Amino acid sequence: MNSAQFYPLLLCLASGFTMCLLAVIGIYLLRRNNTYQFQLAFAVVMLMLSIGFLNNFIVLAFSDDDTAVFINMLLILYDYVVVGGYMIFVVTLVFPGRFSALKLSLFEVPYMLSIAMFAITQSPLVYPIVQIYTLAASSVLLVWMLYSIKRYNRMLLDNVGDIEHLNLNWAVILIVLLYVVQLLWAVESLSNQSWFTVPTADSNLLFDTLWCFITIVYVLFILRKIVQQQVLVDEPSPSQTSSEKDSLLPDETTEEYYKVLNTIDIDNLIRGKQYYLDTALTLHKLATHLGTNRQYLSNFINREKQKTFYEYINDFRVEAAKHLLDGWSNGNEHSMEDLAAMSGFNSYSTFLRQFVKKYGVSPSQYLKESNK
């Protein structure tokens, strides 16, 4: 088999496998119960992207003539419809439930119009205009999303004791990578005018085959993350008529209020009641336990303790873990994962990171040194 047969066959096999995998992922997400809006958006993008891989089959079926160029151009413009779908997915990921389907569909309007415009006029100017528009829109979206993620993650630190599956740090990597791909795509297309040609060279076919495998890797990465991703539901403030509140705290956020908080020694109260063992503990829950307003409590932790709520609660958990380790012997049957759970952590990786941050050694190393 020569290269003229091998590379097209390889591309067809890779494209076919990628199409099937994307379609299965899309159907899987659509059929899941309690699916978030961003998961539905990603499911639709996967189905759209799977259709886009038909490009490789259709282009290979035509010779390098005007018909092939026309069909290839329509399919490439369809790829930008998929780009619009990615934009919708990113927005719904960062702002879950904030925008209606009608508003989100506005992302697709320019791309649908571009397909219609080219189908009618067959003007070669349509593609570079779409490229420039997409690059400008992607730049604005990049800045907006990175700023919003930074604010969101900061809000999590001030309100949640476990952010393992709530934070969007992974989404920063995703958004930047998608932007870089779009930028490279625009530079390559505009500099070489590659949209006028049908990719029949072996090097192009090989690159398209590699792109199939790259697509599989990043799609599986995103799938894993969005299935794990949770959304923080805003909780109402606790009732101001709480009997606990009347017995513990004054009504205003005054200097007197902070003096009272210091007087009742919240640290020892949390230790005594072991509120930190609740893996789903939030600022709202702790404020309810203490009989106060979560804004008052947040101001107190930030001002008096110079910490975020996340840091404040995990300090208690790490302290509890250290206390448990001090009572362990080398023959203890519990694992470090057990220790993390017993201390209020949802994940061992978070526990390990927080323990090393506070004590400078890993739990295993601390246990080894304490048993010398």
Image (cartoon, grey):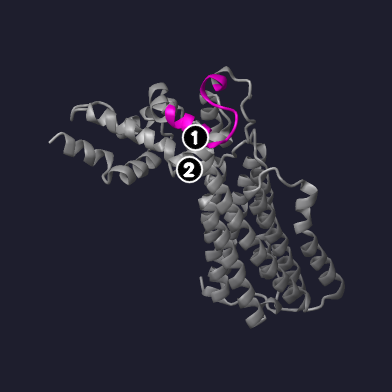
Extreme-bottom residue of the structure: 192
Is residue 212 shown to the viewer in this render? no
User: What residue is drawn where x is 23% and y is 30%?
Assistant: 326
Q: Secondary structure beneath disc 2?
A: helix
Instruction: Identify residue type, mark 2.
Output: Arg
Write down the quadrant of residue 156 in the picture.
top right
Image quadrant holding the C terminus, namely top left
Left or right? Give the position of 75 relative to 178.
right
Q: Judge the density around disc 1: few (<14), some (14-19), many (≥20) Cα neighbours within 10 Å.
A: some
Write down the quadrant of residue 202 in the picture.
bottom right
Foreground of the two, 171 or 76: 171
Is residue 322 covered in magenta?
A: no
The residue at which mark 2 appears reads as: 303
User: What residue is drawn where x is 62% and y is 54%?
Assistant: 19
Q: Judge the density around disc 2: few (<14), some (14-19), many (≥20) Cα neighbours within 10 Å.
A: few
Q: Earlier in the sequence, mark 2 or mark 1?
A: 1
Magenta span of residues: 245-263
Instruction: Identify residue type, mark 1.
Output: Tyr
Foreground of the two, 204 or 238: 238
Q: Position of residue 224 (x, y in %)?
A: 52, 45
Q: How many marks?
A: 2
> What is the C-alpha distance between the residues marked 2 and 1?
9 Å
Q: Position of residue 216 (x, y in %)?
A: 54, 55
